[in-house]
Image (spheres, rainbow, N blue to C red):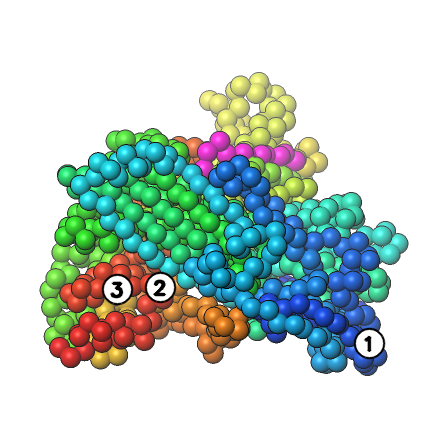
Amino acid sequence: MGQFGLGQAVARKEDARLVTGRGCFTDDIQPPGCAHAAFLRSPHAHARILTVDCEEARRMPGVLAVYTSAELDAAGIGPLPCVTLYENRDGTPMAAPERPVLARERVRFVGDPVVAVIAETAHAARDALEAVTVEYAPLEAVVETDRALDPDAPTIWPEAPGNLALDWETGDAGAVDRLFAAARRVVELTLVNNRIVVNPMETRACLAEYDGERDRLTLTVGSQGVHSMQRILAENVLRIPKEKLRVVTRDVGGAFGMKIFVFPEYPVCLHAARTLGRPVKWVADRGESFLADSHGRDHVTTVAIAVDENGRMTALRASAIANLGAYLSQVGPFIPTECGAYMYTGVYAFEAAHYRVRCVFTNTAPVDAYRGAGRPEAAYAVERAVDYAARELRCDPIEFRRRNLIRPEAMPFRTALGYTYDSGDFPRLLDTALARADAAGFAARREAARASGRLLGLGVACYIERCAGGSEEDARLELRPDGRLRIYIGTQNNGQGHETAYAQIAADRLGLPFADIEVVQGDTDLVATGRGTGGSRSIPIGGAAVLQASERLVERAKAIAAEMLEAATTDIAFEDGVFRIVGTDRRTTLVEVAATAGGLEENGRFKPEAPTFPNGCHVCELSIDLATGVPRIERYTVVDDFGVVVNPALLAGQVHGGLAQGIGQALLEHTVYDGSSGQLLSGSLMDYVLPRADDLPTFDFEWVVIPCRTNPLGVKGAGEAGAIGAPPAVINAVVDALSGFGIHHVDMPATPARLWRLLLRAGALAA
């Protein structure tokens, strides 16, 4: 509808509130009598707990309670569950040791919570931690992903001999073997997908409150969906009826997958609030976030590609070791298996593929979803392997890709790993991106850069991801007699702009003023159901539910309008918020109908029959200073296919944010644990480098609209795409810049020190 309908770059409804300081984040809420929690965390990566003495801490001024695992066990507090357990490829169940809320008998990573103190103030709680005495017996630790399976590596869990949590596979190993045997050439590459600390701007926080009269708890928490938080905390951990726990999420300052999950601090604060009869708050400091949040990525992967005599890739074999950390996080095993595995064929017409992953325990923070969750790992492995294969075969990487891309006329295309791509034109996106990046002029720019002491490289990555499949989403629309519309939906805004996008969808269909539409999320008392936000599902699935509810509302209102206009329903047309008798000038508005009816309500539910497959092409032009090894992105071009675009401004914001995180992983971010002690060496922003404005170029972003055939809106999802395509594009550019010195692979992050050492060994610095 006009300037506020689908496809319009409408300014975000949220921004006026947020930029004027009227947002409400968890730490902004300070109820009367609020107590504060602090957690004593293990200084050891692996140790037995011999004794815990909390008596002095209990006597400290302002201390209200001190908890260890013994107190929580006595109160019936259960372990934190992993909800995605799988069978090994031999049919046996995976290793699934329990994760206690507070460490019991043994600690397994630096940061493992051991003791909780509740006090009148946050300072008093932290002071009391100093009075707790824990005696440990240190044990040998293993933190390296590719060392976890070594025969001499220490065993972290008796339930997981050799630290193997899961050995899982998919694909047709026999067909791959036959195609490999017939191949003219097999090219193999081993690469590292480095571990990431999530680092949202707002750290994790929670506020627990207890209503003694109703025997009911309320948890206010930064989350990506209140309903899963409610269900898991109530049913699995607190072991109370779900109705006894209300979960509320206000504004959220970034989440990126990590805030989906239940962490130990939440049930501790809920237990304390119930026991003490007063509110209890906990807010992580940045150091705690580094130690105790779930981390992302951390795979070591070997990819082999079979190529026939015509230069066509016929088969792919991938084998990964995926680090799950010390405990199974809530969906940790899902990420390297079902979430990412089926994307290992990328945008290429492989005849067969096979993927195997061994998930391992290490003495590190648990690993779980981080923006893209499995798909960036797959895209990086495939796009680096394709680029590497082209260079090994002395082919131009761009032409090698073009020769092997799935053709648009083949759509819908069933991949070798079983997904069906419903739509897409991969060659068109590649050609469009290369034209916008002026790839034809690159050779001249490379010569000019070399003359000024810089190596210039051009990197291309064609990605595809799977999102917006699986579970349903409900939306409830409430049109009040005054014409204001409320949308109740169980996804959760973390900065993406849901309030704007959902309002646009409803305004477009209902013809209501954009300013009169309100979106309600984040409260289990107000929104009956919800699957939360993750996997770029909110607009493709939640938006489709809003659309369906809007259409049902129109149909309900049409019957009332027909009575008001004294006409048959079949003679009534609806457009731009107005019901008209066809062929006459008699009319009434949707708002007038709502006023006559005393308000209208309608529900919508959308459950996708298939996922959507956003895709695109990234082109990165990057220079490396020969004297220092410092890389700099000179140009960055992205052309994406997200299907129908709801709001171009929101879309650009999502892509730009993902690009920043993907570039950060490729060039800057590196989570480092000491191999002997298991200490986190990159445990602060002094040691862990996040991308800054001057690390990023101005992005050239364009999109091509190829509507999705499996979604009523035609949208494909966009929230994770930038983080998926950027790492391989950047590293492909780095390798291209270094290729003249015989360097065909560089692991992430491609830091100045790493690049300088490579150039030194290659003799480039003496040239």
- Residue 35 in percent (x, y) is at 77, 70
2 or 3: mark nearer the eye:
2
> Which residue is under mark 1?
55
> Which residue is under mark 2?
748
Location of residue 265 by image quarter: bottom right
Location of residue 692 by image quarter: bottom left
Q: Is residue 115 above or below residue 478?
A: below
Q: Which amino acid type is marked by label 2?
A: Met
2 or 1: mark nearer the eye:
1
> Which residue is under mark 3?
734
Q: Secondary structure at mark 2?
A: loop
| Spatial CA span between label 1 and label 3 | 57 Å
Q: Earlier in the sequence, mark 2 or mark 3?
A: 3
Q: Which amino acid type is marked by label 3?
A: Val
Q: Nearer the viewer, residue 553 or 268?
A: 268
- Residue 591 in percent (x, y) is at 60, 38
> Does the magenta-highlighted stretch encompass residue 608?
yes
| Spatial CA span between label 2 and label 3 | 10 Å
Which segment is the magenta one?
Answer: 601-612
Characterize the local packing of mark 3: few (<14), some (14-19) or many (20 or more) Cα atoms within 10 angstroms: many
Q: Earlier in the sequence, mark 1 or mark 3?
A: 1
